[in-house]
Amino acid sequence: MLSIQNLQAGLADGTSILKGINLEVKPGEVHAIMGPNGSGKSTLSSVVAGREEYEVTGGDVLLDGESLLDCSPEERAHKGIFLSFQYPVEIPGVSVSNFIKTALNSHRAARGEGPLEAALLLKKMREKLELLEMDKSFLSRSLNEGFSGGEKKRNEIFQMAMLEPRLAILDETDSGLDIDALRIVAQGVNALKSPTNAVVVITHYQRLLEYIVPDFVHVLLHGKIVKSGTKDLALELEERGYDWIKKENAGK
Amino acid sequence: MHNTLLNLYAEHEADLARESGDAVASKRRTAIDRFEALGFPTKKWESWKYTSLKSTLATEYTTVPPFASASQHALEFKDLESYFLDELDAYRVVFVNGVYSSWLSSTTHQGLDVCTLGSSWRKSPDWLAENFAALDELDEPLVLLNRALAREGALVHVPKNTAADKPIQIFYFTTADEPLFSQVRNIVVVESGARVEIIERHQALNGKAHWTNAVTEIRVAPNAHLRYTKLQNDVSTATLTDATFVHQAADSTAVVNTFSCGGKLTRNDLRFHLAGSNAEAHLHGLTLIHGDEHVDHRTYVDHAVPHCTSHEVYKGVYDGRSHGVFNGQIMVRPQAQKTLAYQQNDNLLLNDRAQIDTKPQLEIFADDVKCSHGCTVGQLDADALFYLRARGIPETEARALLMLAFANDALAQVELPALERKLHALIHKKLRVSVS
């Protein structure tokens, strides 16, 4: 489904961040990308989602065999890429429901469909809110404005539930969450899993992976994936930290 | 132009004096002498540094004489309906080419007075002598010119402890075939414990370079409440120079919302005098312009007594080669302890050619006050834009949504649902947004 091939990217000033990433994600799979601060995890998710501040200098990102690199962020979203932001942006004056409606109908328009009927939209929103144990008063609040850390992340997963992406990238979704919020968020993600979609979880900590169990774990270091394994690798990292991997790679 | 106006005054001075009595006549005389001495403002003046009247003054105008007779126009109510607020049951005072149109208006003398200045000189000379040119203390040529020549406009008088049963809409339409220069003046008095809501609009109905020079004097008595909305969305050839003076007594509330969304040149002088303790003033402005449009907001809030509050928020979105000016001054006099004053001016420039000159000024002479001011000039937030696009919202729509969110604050003090709907639609149209 998603194929990242020797991806190299950096900032416009020439700073190189990703130095040849290779990753294959198949339908139905859950991948975790772990790594210390500054290893390029968030850059990777931004580049896949199409953030224009980053410059791709080599390699390719393919979705179902087609390159995404010439697509705008909105086109990538329409093709089924979803990025759950580490720091969701506060937008005063735009309500959650208005935002979701605009986003959902943009997806539909891209597929050549008309706007979703108001009653159906409302029904769908209520269902997904329930899944994430969110009150419906949420819908009329300004997008992320004054939301707690937990509310922001739940709101991200709520949007994911509404947009039903093929590939969801969860960027540090666990940061700033207490254990209850973490459980609810993970529950939401698990409920949305299907044999036709896939999830890439980017995280610092093993904690989230107890709830969203990955099929594969990759370690990102200095802009490269230096080690891949199963969920046991995450446990090992939790126990031993990243130094042994750094040492392993020092010689290469 | 200067001479034409002096001659126009000389020609009508005797008639004006006969109509309005000695007290007003002497005010007019002083004003025209001062206007003669000052001439029109130029960019060398501090108060006109960023706004040039040059191109407006270069136009050949027909000046509306003080005693203009009803002009021949074929306007029907249905032609103007789109400018009125739909479904809103309101009093209407309508002027066409500077002359009152009773045909298009709906006035009253029941419970409150909603009528015209022109018809009141004869009926209420004492009241007018007391209220005409009572508050327009500004040594500016355009205000002086208006004081000398204006004898027509809307008059609203809400008696003690009366809540106006309907909002009032004041309209100035211009249809003349040649560019028209008119002087109009509104007088609003809200007596103690009374309440009223007014909406004012100036609108040219053709593409001629009309110029309206308006003055509005508003007296808000103790414990009275006023809400005044100026809707400025004129054609891109029209000039509006407006000066509005609000005098507030103790425990009163006054809100002035100014929506400046079109016109070649718009200059708004808005001056609040907080003269009684515990008065509360709200100044909200939203400017949405493009092309070569120019909007200059100059506000002044005078905290003359203790325990008053002023809350001022002006926002602007500038596209094309448009030019905005914000000059907001807050004066806190030595005796005005416990003043609460807030002022904020935020601007979005949508491209490199658009321009904003902003100058917030606080002058505080009291020591126990809480005042803050700030201003921002910027582009749309790149993080927010990416966030919306990553959710599948196309870039143009995402930009519009962010601008809409930015502009929304300005609607905070708009309470009439019909007016809110109209303004929402206007903002959507100006920002080219199709989202609901």
Image: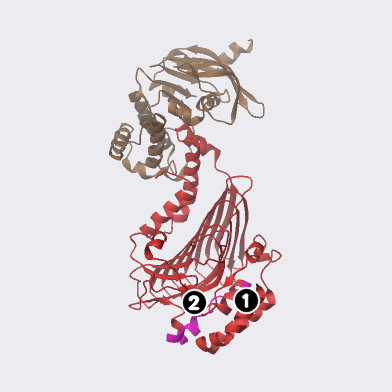
**Residue at the image position 62 percent from the left and 76 percent from the top:** B5
Specify which label sits upstream in the sequence, 2 or 1: 1
Image position, residue A8 (x, y; %): 60, 20
Q: Nearer the viewer, residue A69 or A241?
A: A69
Q: Which residue is at a point 35% across and 25% down the rendered structure image?
A: A192
Residue count near mark 1 (Cα–Cα under 10 Å), binned few <14, some 14–19, many ≥20: some
Q: Which residues are magenta?
A: B121-141
Colour brown, chain: A
Magenta span includes B134 = yes
Which residue position is annotated with label 2?
Answer: B152
Residue at the limit of the structure toward the right, as seen here: B44
- Which residue type carries mark 1? Leu
| Residue B235 coordinates in the image, percent (x, y) | 52, 58
Q: Nearer the viewer, residue B105 or A77?
A: B105
- Pick the quarter of the image with the N terminus of chain A: top left
Q: Chain of mark 2?
A: B
Q: Which residue is mark 1?
A: B5
